[in-house]
Image (spheres, rainbow, N blue to C red):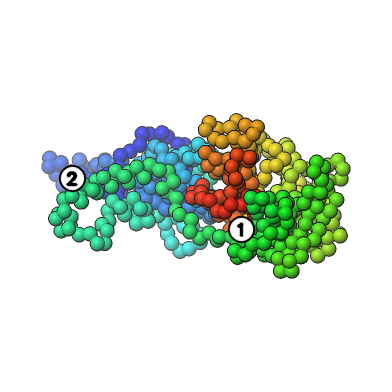
Amino acid sequence: MRALSSTPTLVLCNSLLVANFAAAQTPPPSPSQKPGSPAANAAIPSPVSRHYPILILAHGSEPIWSLRLGMKGPERLDRAGYPPIILDPAEIAPDEPGVSWIYHAKDDVTGADVAVELSRESCSDGMSDIKYTFKVELQHTQIGLLNGCGQSSPEKFPEFRKKNQLDPEDNADEKDKDKGKDKDKDKNKDKEKDKDKDKKSVLDPIINFQPPTAVAYLDAAGKVIFSRSAIRRAVAPEGSELAVSHDGKKLLYTRSDSANGPESTIALYDWDTGRLRDLATTNARSAFWSPDDSRVAFLKYDGKIWQVWTLPVNAPETAAQFSPQPVEALHGWTSSTTILASDLENAYWLGEDKPPETVALKEIYGDSFQAMSSDTLRPNPINADLLLVSAYYLKTPAGAPADSVGLNSTFFLYEVLSKRRTILGPADSYQRAAEWSRDGLQIFYTRGVPGKAPPATWRIFWDATNPSRFNSGAKFVIGR
């Protein structure tokens, strides 16, 4: 990408909404110039158009991404496997007059600088025979450089349709007959302008999500509830660290065997048989199903440290140590051979076929959160690079509810590769134990200050839209 300049934003004209932008016109020769004279044959400088392209849809592959470039500039960046990024458009500058432009923007969440270079030249995405009008280079200071192609697509932008198309039932005669409608429309335009100021108006509603059908949670009395297709069963009078198999037929949970010691047991409940049995005993806890449900990873205490062990479900007596790394918490499988765990300083990707990978929790948590052993780090089911972290603030935000020791908890997304962090938990509440749905689009979390209000399970989409109460349980987990 060429060096970026910072020229004040150029003014759009209405003609841009019908054609991409007006072409520069060459003035006719002066009457004093005769045809064929040297003065007439000399090249006459043409005024350069000050207009820039808008209403562009751009996309690229490796990685897969797309960009909406609206009336004011870049407004939304989408990447496969990640929630959309809202962009705040800034200044636009011609890089080469009439040929290329630089669009500046800010990442709405992190404040990272974004620059989009749009060049008027034929472009191929390498995946189809379509020849696009623009070549696009997008530079995000956290994510990196994305290359692709773009095309003018005004019909796919709501603001263009609202400004240039009438409702099918409207016609000019009806508008002339009722002048009162014009006043109403003026008011509506003002309302639409206010809506446009809402940054999330550029997000498309999530409609392709899959509601969970096999779940487990703790009811108000602390009982372990296992539910499949709206049929509920009370599995145990108490328990913790619930985990439902991917096929939705089995439930794991930790049963404490001591009021003040590490003695605990992992119990297994089978929905089809109704059988409840101990799967791992002698100081075992925090079990997670492997992606194919054939194995279980869990923490085992040797009297001094906790370590990750695994066992085959059909042969639990053959349990073996998975890694010698001492840890404090287990967070689940990121693949069929890799398990995510942590202590109070680092997160560890422990693998059967490769050395462990380590990331400092300080890098994940940033300056706003503090690490505790009760925190959860959940890899997204469709993208292991995207972590869902439940953690306590170092300093409780103003106006946020706090627990008995003055802390507030929330959850955020963290991208391991780009180090991008997005806080999702509503600022006016206390939330904990956030978990992914199996489709990776929904997040279920326990909301309510411990000891001050009955906890309940809420749901929010991964783009931070539509938080709503889901059920009256707590520590909600999903199988399928």
Q: Quadrant of the C terminus?
A: bottom right
Task: In this rendered view, identify the residue nearer to me: 183 or 56.
Answer: 183
Residue type, label 1: Arg
Residue 2 at least partly seen: no
Does residue 172 appear to the left or right of 309 in the view shown?
Answer: left
Q: Residue at x 72, y 36 (%)?
A: 345
Task: In this rendered view, identify the residue nearer to me: 413 or 264.
Answer: 264
Does residue 50 appear to the left or right of 140 in the view shown?
Answer: left
Crowd tier of the residue under label 2, counting other residues whose Cα lies within 10 Å: few below 14, some 14–19, many 20 or above: few
Work out which residue is located at the far bottom of the displayed protein and give it: 272
Give the percent coordinates (x, y) of residue 362: 67, 35
Secondary structure category for the residue under label 1: loop
Crowd tier of the residue under label 1, counting other residues whose Cα lies within 10 Å: few below 14, some 14–19, many 20 or above: some
Does residue 4 appear to the left or right of 53 in the view shown?
Answer: right
Give the percent coordinates (x, y) of residue 244: 68, 58
Residue 264 at least partly seen: yes
Residue labelled with disc 2: 28
Residue labelled with disc 1: 438
Q: Residue at x 15, y 58 (%)?
A: 173
Which quadrant of the structure image shows residue 172?
A: bottom left
Give the percent coordinates (x, y) of residue 335: 70, 56
Secondary structure category for the residue under label 2: loop
Which circle's residue, 1 or 2, is located before the other in the chain? 2
Task: In this rendered view, identify the residue nearer to me: 77 or 361.
Answer: 361
Q: Residue at x 46, y 57 (%)?
A: 124
Work out which residue is located at the far front of the displayed protein and give it: 221
Q: CA distance from mark 1 to mark 2?
A: 67 Å
Task: In this rendered view, identify the residue nearer to me: 404 or 304.
Answer: 404
